[in-house]
Amino acid sequence: MRSSLAVLLATALSVPLSAQTPPSLADLAFMSGCWEGGFGGGGIIEERYTPPSENVMLGTTRYLRGARAVQFELTAIRIDAEGAVTLRPYPGGEASPHAFRLTSVDRSDTPSAVFEAPDNDFPKRIVYRRDPADPATLIARIDNGEGSQEAQEWRMTAAPCRSDP
């Protein structure tokens, strides 16, 4: 009985947005803060998200090799004119032609958010989630949809928000 209740509860918390309470930026609060992880060959990824306001949440990401940034991206998550939550990446500071629409949110103890832009070449999907095995870990994944073999994933842990030069 317990396992059926757990499955039912988990399913109810992660259904598509059309079947649940409309999302707000508050659903993405689990992403806010400063995060750090590794990427290819000893590089460091630093990602920061502001706490959500009623209408916007901002992010910065930089990829470091030693003290040098080799890549960066800005992110704006906003409520659009239709009331949908959208994520627009700005890789290298240039606006992506596609906004990724929030299509699924999990409001459980290990929250997640799925943003999709089916018309984009790659990625078509951006997923942020907390690791169920270690809720202090934020996982960011880009791919071309469920089951896609073409994917990149970064595991980041909470880090101090530094302001030093």
Image: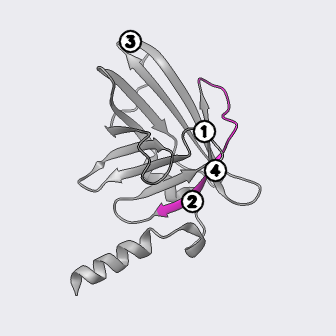
Circle number at residue 103: 2
Q: Amino acid at mark 1?
A: Asp
State how far apart marks 3 and 4 are (Cα).
Answer: 32 Å
Circle number at residue 86: 4
Which span of residues is magenta-colored?
Answer: 92-105
Q: Single out the residue that lies furthest toward the right.
A: 81
In the foreground, 157 or 50 = 157
Q: Amino acid at mark 4?
A: Thr
Residue, disc 3: 67
* Among the 4 quarters of the image, the one containing residue 79: bottom right
Depth check, mark 3 against mark 2: the one in front is 2
Q: Is residue 86 magenta?
A: no
**What secondary structure is marked by label 2?**
strand
Where is the N terminus found, in terms of image quarters? bottom left
Taking the image as shown, residue 154 lies to the left or right of residue 53, namely left
Q: Amino acid at mark 2?
A: Thr
Q: Position of residue 97 (x, y in %)?
A: 70, 37
Q: Earlier in the sequence, mark 3 or mark 2?
A: 3
